Image (tube, rainbow, N blue to C red):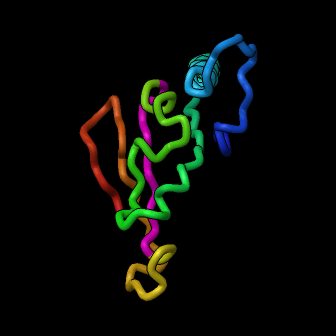
C-alpha cells in the first residue's frame, strides 16, 4: 500500500491536547495495523522541512522530516531521496538519485545509488 503525503492524513480520533507529533504517531500505528491485518507493506511519503533548501548540504536527514519525532519513533525504515541535478544543473549526475537509509530496525545505515 502506498500513502502519498502521510501528513495530510487526519487521525481517526482527535484527542484534546495532543500535538502533531503525537497525531503522526497515532496515524503510523494505524498504518502498521493495516499492514499487519492485510499482510502487506506500507510505503508512506512525507514532506521535508523547507530548511533543507537553505543549507549547503542538501541530502536529507531524519530531522528534516516534518514532525520528525513521530516518524523517528513510528517507522521501521526511513529513506531519504536526493537528486544532485535538482540543485546543481551543471552536474554530471543527471537523472541519478541517491537513496539513503536514515533509519532501519533491520540493518545498519547504507546508501544506494
Seen at 36% across and 38% down, the residue is: 103
Q: Quadrant of the C terminus?
A: bottom left
Is 31 in front, or is 64? 64
Q: Is residue 49 magenta?
A: no
Q: Quadrant of the N terminus?
A: top right
Is 108 in front, or is 49? 49
Question: Magenta segment, which residues?
Answer: 74-84
Is 71 in front, or is 66? 66
Q: Is residue 81 magenta?
A: yes
Q: Where residue 28 appears, x then y in whole percent?
A: 58, 25
Q: Where residue 98 appears, x then y in whole percent?
A: 40, 62
Q: Where residue 13 appears, x then y in whole percent?
A: 75, 14
Instruction: Note whether 107 is above or below 13 in the view shown.
Output: below
Quadrant for residue 63, please give it: top left
Instruction: Note whether 15 is above or below 47 in the view shown.
Output: above
Seen at 47% across and 64% down, the residue is: 54
Q: Where residue 47 appears, x then y in whole percent?
A: 59, 48
Amino acid at each position: 500500500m502506498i500513502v502519498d503525503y502521510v501528513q495530510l492524513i487526519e487521525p481517526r480520533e482527535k484527542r484534546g491536547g495532543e500535538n502533531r507529533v503525537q497525531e503522526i504517531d497515532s496515524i503510523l500505528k494505524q498504518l502498521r495495523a493495516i499492514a499487519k491485518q492485510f499482510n502487506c507493506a506500507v510505503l508512506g511519503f512525507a514532506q521535508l522541512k523547507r530548511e533543507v533548501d537553505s543549507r549547503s548540504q542538501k541530502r536529507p536527514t531524519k530531522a528534516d522530516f516534518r514532525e520528525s519525532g513521530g516518524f523517528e519513533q513510528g517507522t521501521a525504515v526511513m529513506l531519504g531521496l536526493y537528486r544532485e541535478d535538482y540543485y546543481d544543473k551543471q552536474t554530471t549526475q543527471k537523472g541519478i538519485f541517491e537513496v539513503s537509509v536514515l533509519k532501519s530496525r533491520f540493518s545498519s545505515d547504507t546508501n544506494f545509488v
